[in-house]
Image (cartoon, coloured by chain):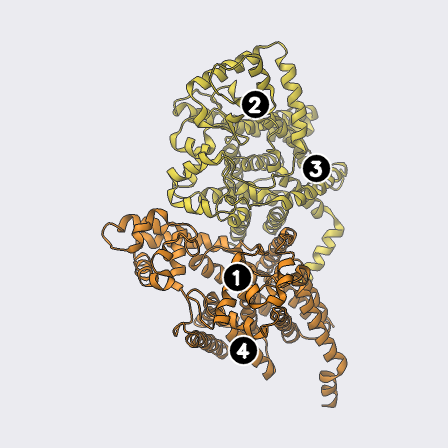
Chain colours: A orange, B yellow
């Protein structure tokens, strides 16, 4: 007992772990440090901040990330936001290496893994970015650890549960991705061979139910927060409008309006010859001629419903969905660090005037950030990881739990690609936010192998 | 599903990487020309009708994505068959997948596969030619597949037929010189020659059925016109014999390396060009000037491995028009592609490609001179010879148009042969296999 206490709580091992997490967080902050300020994304960062400072949820996104920035920054410095993001991600990965593979030397593999994803993939960019995208991998990692780890201390369960709830609630797409992942696991339990695989990998049915509960609670939590801030009791914001935008991009809307405008009295028919590709955000979009997001939602809901229930159009939607899923799966360049728009410039002047010079003089705003090397490395790592996993499945290599973990990560990437590609659009940031999870099973296996060998 | 087939499909999906990341198949200024000729069945002045027919039929006149899927599938199958017969391993399909991963990550093969243009087929033709020449004890089914793909690929451009004709003749001569030891080479080279001739006959038949001459090209003189224009030789002629057609800018006649701008080829212009080329080729010192420039440009072409920085859709009106006309429901996809925003940058692939070619070249040279160990020496020689021959032939028709970059990925093969033959590397691979429990 004394030995156990000494081993667990001895200053040397505890201090080493804390130091490792801090070093990892520092590595993950690389791009923010290199830039001289946290990175921002065109007007989106501004919209989150504006909603939070105005204490009013917008029509197209939950307010939760805005509140996250509002409170964590203490209305003083956005550095605090990215530092917390870095610590969360670093700690989450630490928990994986500590509780999934455990044993001697796991810190070495943990730090090498963090170094790889921070400098040669998009992890550091996502962590250093004032966008909620970092919470997608946080949610997936939290869910994954709760499923795969054989035993976890209570405080870790608490931490992972909070991260799941916050991670899922913070962006429209996270709910569908996480729910989809967990539901696939639940559905798999119906079939004998898959049940055997899940059970053999340590994935218990009650944990799957617990996760469903957490995700649904998260949806309620998001709806409640939106309600408190004047947006009605709804977890997702502008879903039908997003889908409408997606159908425009697929080309299905043109065919539908061409064939239906004569006998259906839609207001959008007046604009059918000038619908821009950038349906959601272009200033000349019909949305803004028809009363904005809120004013258009009812009509768009009818149109979307009609399209999805008509076989002729549904066939096109399915085909385009498949294409866009694969496109999104391979569309993962990191580094969407554009120059500041007037909107974000104004936002920083208004709300973080003390940091305005740092924001303005950052390399991002000078157009001096170049991610081509990182993107090519990321692509190569993705390809090689995929090749190793193909080998593993071809020859039933590694071990069953690791193979199941690989499947879990790949499913997360696939579901993310499908949800985003089909219901929103094919954008780099959607897949880039999750892609750096792909080498994780390899390093966990190395860490486990090292332990078993020792 | 059979695991090997699944790996082949995964390989094909990976090979389309550039298309996926572009959000649409890559288009060139000449893609519209191919689409138009495929639908109108009008025999083009440069090249031939085959790629256009392939594109419209593979697309089912419905989606251009299907064209690059077919291209990727064909290449994936050929790569798998290549490794089956050159690597003699039960796990040949894993070698093939590894190869496809490396070439996709470090060369521009994915750009070639994902582009609506014929250059991907010369690589396929060379690989098939190598299999026919050097593979032993091929299954009948595999032989039929390789032969069919070879014949089909050669037909995509007249320069490919010329290349394979020269290569097969060279190896035929080599086989005769070797006499008894060269019987296998003679057999293989004869088969390549026969299939190349069948390919020529196939194009000629299609052209004849489409109302043209029984020939693989529309016009023997004007088939080399792109090369004459690009090398500046035609300009000299225009200066010597001014054009009677008003406002004709000869340099603007070409779209991309492979095609003429259909809209500018009026009967008057065609007549002027035909007459000019006849005049030019009749000049006493034409051959000296032409072949002098040809050898120089062929050498330049053989080392031109850096792709253009951007896969931009310059002068894209013809292509956009043809997509609008024939694939109207995909117009929005074109306008959302990275290409149209000029952000489809493959410069970093160019650097890694140069490195891979260098490593492959060194590996190839080592394998050729290391007679005892290498089982693939014959293929290495074939690769070196066909590289120079294709550079020569593409320059003959199109000038130094940078088409050799589409073949650079073949230089990764010597590297794989080297890895296979190296006992040190094999030892490391065995350790990794044991470690991963494979």
**Mark 3 lies on residue:** B377
Chain assignment, label 3:
B
**Mark 1 lies on residue:** A413
Which is in the foreground here, disc 3 or disc 4? Answer: 4
**Mark 4 lies on residue:** A162
Chain assignment, label 2:
B
Q: Can you say which quadrant of the picture contains the N terminus of chain A?
A: bottom right
Is mark 1 in CB contact (under 8 Å) with mark 2? no
In the displayed orientation, state which residue is furthest to the top. Answer: B284
Decide: few, some or many residues near mark 2? Use Cα within 10 Å; few <14, some 14-19, many ≥20: some
**Gap between marks 3 and 1 measured at Cα:** 43 Å
**Gap between marks 1 and 2 measured at Cα:** 49 Å
* Residue A137: x %, y % from top left: 56, 67
Decide: few, some or many residues near mark 4? Use Cα within 10 Å; few <14, some 14-19, many ≥20: some
Whether residue B332 sits left or right of residue A309 in the image: it is right
Residue A407 vs B3, above or below: the answer is: below
């Amino acid at each position: 007992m004394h030995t156990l206490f000494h081993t667990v709580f001895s200053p040397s091992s505890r201090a080493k772990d804390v130091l490792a997490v801090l070093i990892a967080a520092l590595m993950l902050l690389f791009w923010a440090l290199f830039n001289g300020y946290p990175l921002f994304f065109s007007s989106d960062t501004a919209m989150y901040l504006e909603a939070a400072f105005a204490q009013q949820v917008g029509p197209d996104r939950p307010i939760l990330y805005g509140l996250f920035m509002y409170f964590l920054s203490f209305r003083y410095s956005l550095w605090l936001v990215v530092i917390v993001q870095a610590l969360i991600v670093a700690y989450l990965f630490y928990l994986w290496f500590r509780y999934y593979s455990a044993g001697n030397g796991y810190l070495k593999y943990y730090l090498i893994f963090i170094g790889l994803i921070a400098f040669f993939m998009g992890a550091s960019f996502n962590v250093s970015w004032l966008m909620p995208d970092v919470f997608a991998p946080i949610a997936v990692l939290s869910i994954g650890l709760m499923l795969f780890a054989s035993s976890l201390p209570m405080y870790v369960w608490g931490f992972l549960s909070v991260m799941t709830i916050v991670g899922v609630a913070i962006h429209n797409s996270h709910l569908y991705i996480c729910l989809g992942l967990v539901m696939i696991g639940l559905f798999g339990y119906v079939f004998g061979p898959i049940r055997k695989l899940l059970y053999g990998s340590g994935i218990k049915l009650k944990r799957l139910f617990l996760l469903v509960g957490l995700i649904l609670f998260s949806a309620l939590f998001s709806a409640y927060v939106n309600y408190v801030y004047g947006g009605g009791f709804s977890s997702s914001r502008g879903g039908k409008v997003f889908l409408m935008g997606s159908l425009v991009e697929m080309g299905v809307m043109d065919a539908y309006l061409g064939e239906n405008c004569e006998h259906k009295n839609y207001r959008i028919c007046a604009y059918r010859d000038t619908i821009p590709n950038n349906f959601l955000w272009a200033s000349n979009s019909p949305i803004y001629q028809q009363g904005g997001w809120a004013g258009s939602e009812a009509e768009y809901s009818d149109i979307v419903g009609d399209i999805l229930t008509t076989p002729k159009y549904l066939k096109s939607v399915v085909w385009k969905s498949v294409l866009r899923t694969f496109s999104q799966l391979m569309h993962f360049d990191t580094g969407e660090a554009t120059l500041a728009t007037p909107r974000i410039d104004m936002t920083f002047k208004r709300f973080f005037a003390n940091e305005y010079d740092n924001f303005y003089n950052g390399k991002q705003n000078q157009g001096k950030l170049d991610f081509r090397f990182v993107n090519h490395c990321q692509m190569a790592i993705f390809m090689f990881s995929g090749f190793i996993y193909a080998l593993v499945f071809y020859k039933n290599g590694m071990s069953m739990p690791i193979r199941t973990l690989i499947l879990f990560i790949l499913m997360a990437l696939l579901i993310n690609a499908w949800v985003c590609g089909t219901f929103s659009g094919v954008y780099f940031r959607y897949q880039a936010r999750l892609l750096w999870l792909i080498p994780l099973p390899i390093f966990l296996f190395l860490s486990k192998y090292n332990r078993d060998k020792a | 599903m059979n695991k090997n087939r699944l790996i082949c499909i995964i390989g094909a999906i990976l090979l389309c990487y550039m298309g996926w990341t572009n959000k649409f198949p890559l288009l060139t200024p000449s893609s519209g020309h191919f689409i138009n000729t495929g639908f109108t069945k009008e025999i083009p002045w440069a090249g031939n009708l085959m790629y256009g027919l392939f594109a419209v039929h593979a697309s089912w006149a419905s989606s251009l994505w299907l064209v690059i899927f077919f291209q990727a599938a064909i290449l994936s199958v050929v790569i798998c068959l290549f490794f089956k017969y050159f690597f003699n391993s039960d796990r040949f399909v894993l070698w093939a997948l590894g190869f496809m991963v490396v070439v996709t990550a470090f060369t521009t093969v994915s750009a070639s596969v994902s582009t609506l243009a014929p250059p991907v087929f010369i690589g396929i033709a060379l690989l098939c030619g190598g299999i026919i020449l050097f593979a032993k004890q091929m299954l009948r089914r595999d032989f039929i597949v390789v032969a069919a793909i070879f014949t089909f690929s050669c037909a995509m451009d007249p320069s490919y037929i010329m290349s394979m004709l020269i290569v097969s003749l060279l190896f035929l001569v080599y086989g005769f010189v070797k006499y008894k030891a060269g019987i296998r080479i003679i057999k293989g080279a004869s088969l390549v020659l026969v299939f190349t001739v069948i390919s020529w006959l196939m194009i000629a038949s299609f052209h004849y059925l489409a109302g043209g001459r029984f020939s693989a090209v529309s016009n023997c003189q004007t088939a080399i016109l792109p090369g004459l224009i690009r090398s500046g030789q035609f300009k000299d002629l225009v200066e010597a014999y001014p054009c009677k057609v008003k406002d004709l800018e000869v340099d603007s006649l070409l779209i991309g390396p492979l095609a003429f701008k259909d809209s500018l080829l009026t009967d008057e212009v065609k007549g002027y060009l035909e007459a000019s080329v006849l005049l030019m080729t009749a000049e006493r010192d034409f051959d000296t000037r032409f072949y002098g420039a040809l050898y120089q440009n062929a050498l330049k072409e053989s080392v031109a491995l850096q792709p253009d920085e951007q896969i931009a859709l310059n002068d894209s009106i013809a292509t956009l028009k043809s997509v609008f006309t024939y694939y109207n429901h995909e117009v929005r996809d074109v306008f959302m592609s990275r290409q149209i925003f000029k952000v489809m940058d493959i410069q970093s692939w160019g650097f890694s490609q140069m490195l891979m070619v260098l490593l492959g070249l060194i590996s190839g040279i080592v394998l050729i001179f290391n007679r005892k160990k290498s089982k693939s020496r014959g293929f290495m020689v074939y690769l070196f010879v066909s590289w120079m021959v294709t550079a020569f032939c593409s320059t003959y028709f199109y000038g130094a148009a940078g088409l050799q970059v589409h073949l650079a990925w073949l230089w990764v093969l010597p590297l794989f042969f080297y890895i296979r033959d190296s006992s040190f590397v094999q030892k490391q691979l065995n350790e990794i296999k044991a470690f991963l429990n494979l």
